Image (spheres, rainbow, N blue to C red):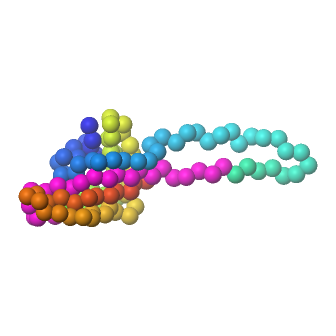
Amino acid sequence: MYTIDNISFFSYGLFLSEYDGQADLLDPKNQFFTVYAKEGYQITKRTGNILEINGFVIGTDQADFIAKAQVLQGIFKAPGTRTIILDNNPIECFCVNGFEVTNVHLSGIFYGKIKIKLIIV
């Protein structure tokens, strides 16, 4: 089941091809250590949780395709977090830079590739 705020991807004309990212980072390692004769510190490198979704937006005609893209734009530009469920795994996230629709084609139906980068909370 794939949803955005409990609404199916299919309702938005969104079909998932792949997603990549870390939904659950491991806990940081213990920061306690012993140092003699100098001040001690430890740097732990940590990256942000980024979820990247790649898929397709499909519309029956040009007007339907544009309408579905505008609905997705409205969802991701709205303030607050979104709950996206991927493989029955709920993920709280928000969109910083919007999304990108490329390679729009007409082959009986309108479809285009979509790429969404999300920050996981």
Q: Position of residue 87 (x, y in %)?
A: 33, 36
User: Could you tell me which residue is drawn at 8 percent across and 58 percent down?
Assistant: 108
User: Could you tell me which residue is drawn at 21 percent across and 56 percent down?
Assistant: 57
User: Could you tell me which residue is drawn at 65 percent across and 40 percent down?
Assistant: 29
Q: Nearer the viewer, residue 114 or 48?
A: 114
- Is residue 106 in view? yes
Q: Position of residue 61 (x, y in %)?
A: 8, 61
How many marks are shown on the rendered structure? 0
Q: Which residues are magenta?
A: 44-67
Q: Quadrant of the N terminus?
A: top left
Verify whether residue 54 appears in magenta. Answer: yes
In terms of image quadrants, where is residue 99?
bottom left
In terms of image quadrants, where is residue 60?
bottom left
- Is residue 7 in view? no
Q: Position of residue 44 (x, y in %)?
A: 66, 49
User: Could you tell me which residue is drawn at 85 percent across and 45 percent down?
Assistant: 35
> Is 28 left, or right, of 61 in this rendering?
right
> Is 102 left, or right, of 35 in this rendering?
left
Q: Nearer the viewer, residue 22 or 17?
A: 17
